[in-house]
Amino acid sequence: MKEYCERWEPSGKLKNYGNFPVIYDIEYFLPDGLAIKMSDMYGKRVSFVFANGVWAQRGTEESLRLRPIALPLEYSVFFKVINSSYIKWLSEKSGDEIDFSQLTHFVFAGSNLILDVVAGSEPSVEFIN
């Protein structure tokens, strides 16, 4: 099955989130937590907190990634990757010792960075403003 992205609405709270968001901070906290902070063009700031940890994350300058992931045509910011090649790669690198089938590949598409996160649960959403 081919990898593809589907639009994701985190917690249903961000339906009116503005265009051209910028990822302005990524915080790591112990033991394995991750917080991603984004701001849209209107200054609306939001934080996504993976308090239960993440298995992996990677960031790529956005112009290098738009074609390979085949993002949907309508502009969106948040995606889940179905049949993720990133999760498959992680599984192979672990020697298939870890069951990655219950994990989800999330994509945060900012105007400056595309951040991929593999986690076992969705992040909580916190508005900063």
Image: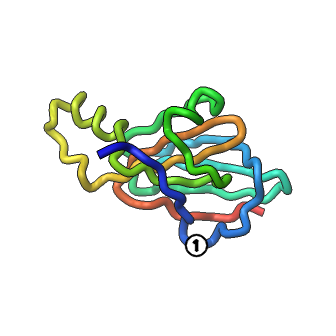
Q: Residue at x 49, y 59 (%)?
A: 123
Q: Residue at x 63, y 71 (%)?
A: 13
To which quarter of the image does residue 24 belong? top right
> Label 1 amino acid?
Gly
Depicted 66 relative to depicted 64: above or below: below
Depicted 114 relative to depicted 95: above or below: below
Which color scheme did the rendering employ for the protein?
rainbow
In the image, taking residue 102 as reference, residue 61 lies left or right, namely: right
72, 56: nearer the viewer: 72
Asked if residue 57 shows in the view, the reply is yes
The 10 Å Cα crowd at callout 1, few under 14, some 14 to 19, many 20 or more, is few
Depicted 60 relative to depicted 14: above or below: above
In the image, taking residue 30 as reference, residue 65 lies left or right, namely: right
Where is the C terminus found, in terms of image quarters? bottom right
Q: Residue at x 50, y 33 (%)?
A: 68
Q: Position of residue 5 (x, y in %)?
A: 47, 50
29, 8: nearer the viewer: 8
Asked if residue 32 shows in the view, the reply is no
Q: Residue at x 70, y 35 (%)?
A: 112
Q: Position of residue 103 (x, y in %)?
A: 32, 52
Outermost right residue:
42
Depicted 104 relative to depicted 17: above or below: above
Q: Position of residue 31 (x, y in %)?
A: 39, 46
Q: Position of residue 11 (x, y in %)?
A: 54, 70
Outermost bottom residue:
12
Judging by the rendered image, the residue that carries numbered circle 1 is: 12
Q: Of helix, strand and loop, which one carries label 1? A: helix
